[in-house]
Amino acid sequence: MPQFDITSFPSQIFWLVVVFAILYILMSKIALPKVGDVLERRHKTIEDNLGKARALKDETDAAIARYEAALAEARDAAHADIREASEKATAQQAAETEAMARKLSEKTSAAEKRIAQAKTTALSGVSEAAADIAREATAKLIGVKVQTKTAENAVAAVIGE
Amino acid sequence: MAGPLEQFEIKPLADLSVGGFDVSFTNSALWMVIAAVLVTGFMTMSMRRGALVPGRWQGAAEVMYEFVANMLKDNVGTAGRKYFPFVFTLFMFVLFGNLLGMIPHGFAFTSHIIVTFAMALVIFVGVTIIGFARHGTHYLRMFFPEGAPIATAIILIPIEIISYFSRPFSLAIRLFANMTVGHIMLKVIGGFVGLIGIFGVLPFAMLTGITVLEFGIAALQAYVYTILTCIYLHDAIHMH
C-alpha cells in the first residue's frame, strides 16, 4: 500500500507544512478579515435601518396622536358653537313670538273698541233718523206737529221693546 | 488494468532535496497546491466586491465562513475566536482535499495517513499546549475528573490517559480510512463495469450511487475532522 511507504513521508510532510502555512496566512491575513468586515458592515447597516425605522415609527405615532388631539378639540369647539347658536336662535324666536302676540292682541282690542264705538254711533243715528221720519210722517199723515222730544221717546220706546 | 491501490501512488514531479531528505514536489503536493489555490481563489474572488447584498459566489463564501464560525462558537464559545483562522483553514483544506479526490485522475492527499496524522499531531500538540498554558498543572485534572471517588483513580486515570493520547490516532485514521476505502471501492466496482459486458449496468448503477455517497462522505469527514478539533479545543479551554 503506497500509504505505508515511509520514503514518501518527508516529501508529504514538507509540502503539507508549506502549503498549509501559506494557506493559513492567506486566510487569516486577507480572506477572512474581508468576509468578517462585510458581515459586520451588513449587520451594522441592518441595525441602523431598523433603528431608523423605529424612530420614524415613533415620530409617526406622535404625529397621529397630535392630529387626533387637534381633531377632538375642534370637534368639541364646533359642538359648543352649535349649541350656543341654537340656544340664541331659540331665545330670539321666543322673544319675537311674544312681541308679535302682544302687538296682535293690542291691535285686536283697538279694533274691537272702534267697532263698538261705530256701532253706538250708528245706533244713535238710526233712532234720531227714525224720530225725524216719525215726526215727518206724523205731520204728513195727520198734520200734527209732534215735538221732537216726544218722537224720540216714542222711537226709543219702540226700539227698546 | 491498474490495481485499486495504484491511484494512491506518490509520483515525484520535480526532484528536490533539503538536508538530506527527499522532499520532491509530487502529485500529492501538486493537489495540495491546487486545493490551496482554489480555496484562496474562492474566498477572495467571491468577496472582491464585498456587496451588502451578496451574489451567488459571495453568498457561498459567506456560508462557509459562518458555518465554521458557528461550529467554533457552539463548541468552544467566544474563547475560541482567535483559533478561527486555523480551524477555517483546516476545514477548507480537508474539504477541498477530499472533494478534489473525486475528480477522475485527481488525487486525494487526505487518503494518506501521514498527511492526516501530521495535521492531527499538530492539533493534538497545539491543544495540549493551550490546555497547559491556560490551566497550568491543573490541566492534568483532565485525567482524573473532579468529584470522582479516589478509589476509582487506579482505573480511571489509565483510561483517561489512553483516551487522551488516542485522539490524534483516531482523528488521523478516521479520515485516512474513509478516503482510502471509498476510493478503493470506486476503483474495484468501476473495474467490474467493463468486465462483465451487458451486465455491467448493475455495477454501473451501484457505482453511481456510491459516487454520490462518496461526495457526501468527503464533506462529512471534513466536518467530523473539524468538529473534533473544536471539541478538543473546548476541553483544553474549559476542561471537562
Image (cartoon, coloured by chain):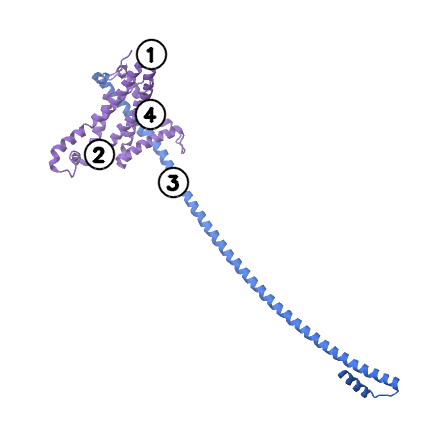
Chain colours: A blue, B purple
Q: Do the residues labelled 2 and 4 touch (CB within 8 Å)?
A: no
Give the CA distance from mark 2 to mark 4.
29 Å
Residue linked to disc 2: B235
* Quarter of the view holding residue A17: top left
Disc 3: host chain: A
- Give me the disc on residue B197: 1
Choose the circle earlier in sequence order: 1 or 4: 4
Name the front one of labels 3 and 1.
1
**Of B128 and A114, the residue lying toward us:** A114
Asked whether residue B28 is in view, the answer is no
* Quarter of the view holding residue B93: top left
Q: In this view, does B35 lie to the left or right of B117?
A: right
> Which amino acid type corresponds to the residue marked 2 in the rendered image?
Asp
Give the CA distance from mark 4 to mark 3.
31 Å
Give the CA distance from mark 1 to mark 4.
41 Å
User: SS at mark 2?
Assistant: helix
* Quarter of the view holding residue A123: bottom right
Q: Residue at x 84, y 82 (%)?
A: A133
Q: In this view, does B169 lie to the left or right of B102?
A: left
User: SS at mark 4?
Assistant: helix
> Which amino acid type corresponds to the residue marked 4 in the rendered image?
Val
Residue linked to disc 4: B39
Q: Where is residue A22 in the image (x, y as percent from the top left)?
A: 29, 25
Give the CA distance from mark 3 to mark 1.
64 Å
Q: Position of residue A82 (x, y in %)?
A: 55, 60
Residue linked to disc 3: A47
Disc 1: host chain: B
Asked whether residue B40 is in view, the answer is yes
Q: Residue at x 12, y 37 (%)?
A: B150
